[in-house]
Image: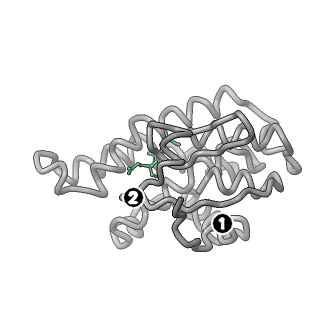
Amino acid sequence: MRARMALKYAGIEVEHREIELRNKPPSMLMASPKGTVPVLIVGDLVLDQSIEIMRWALRQSDPNNWGEVDDVTAQTWIERNDGPFKVLLDQYKYPNRHPKLNQDDVFDAAIALMLKPLDEAMKSNHYVLGNKQHWIDVAIFPFIRQFSMVNPLQFEQLPLPALKKWLDKHVQSELFNAVMAKHPAWID
Ligand SMILES: N[C@@H](CCC(=O)N[C@@H](CS)C(=O)NCC(=O)O)C(=O)O
């Protein structure tokens, strides 16, 4: 979602090929053997990390200066999100794959690692890095959205008002809703 959003924001038209993960087309695996989505192919260039796609899109066009400020802090957030938080998110989403883990511990660890610090960061500002939207907001919020959807009642009870406001704003944004449109699966 974050790669799609950055491409749309930058006004880049793509031929969108929706991939069925259980039935990956050979053309995709030929371009990127690691077999994860998204993959962006531009001539000879193959980008198969969503963050790389975001950075590439913003280098083409960045109309509202999403890439303007503090890339070092953004990098710290992205590493925390894509690394340890993603691990906890998967453990929380798929408890039967992790029968030895205590779900409450997983939940608490995710809050302490990511959700609480995000809420703190956004208490005086509206966005992760200040009062302006940055690519880092778009890079992180789909993961917080997934987290919020695992057990909505549990999420609702969290005392993290700034984070919830930020999440709602992104979920309701035109950009996010524009990229949520369904596409038929691509067949080679
Ligand atoms: N670090 C990669 C992770 C991509 C990733 O894990 N994508 C998942 C779907 S969200 C996937 O393609 N999984 C392969 C599969 O389930 O076979 C990125 O951000 O692009």
Q: Amino acid at mark 2?
A: Asn
Residue under the point 55% across and 36% down: 78
Q: How far across and down, in percent of the image, does residue 151 sit?
A: 33, 68
Q: In which quadrant will I find the N terminus?
A: bottom right
Q: Nearer the viewer, mark 1 or mark 2?
A: 2
Q: How far across and down, in percent of the image, does residue 58 sit?
A: 78, 42
Q: Earlier in the sequence, mark 1 or mark 2?
A: 2
- Residue extending furthest toward the front: 188
Q: Amino acid at mark 1?
A: Val
Left or right placement of residue 48 versus residue 100 in this view: right
Q: How far across and down, in percent of the image, does residue 16 sit?
A: 65, 60
Task: Count every numbered label the image shows and give the total.
Answer: 2
Q: Which mark is residue 23?
A: 2
The crowd level at tag 2 (other Cα within 10 Å; few <14, some 14-19, many 20+) is few
Left or right placement of residue 185 versus residue 56 in this view: left
Residue under the point 84% across and 41% down: 60
**Cα–Cα gap, marks 1 and 2:** 22 Å
Answer with the quarter of the image where residue 155 lies: bottom left
Mark 1 CB lies closer than 8 A to ligand 1:
no
Q: Which residue is mark 1?
A: 179
| Marks 1 and 2 close (CB-CB < 8 Å) | no
The answer to which of 20 and 50 lies nearer the viewer is: 20
Answer with the quarter of the image where residue 20 lies: bottom left
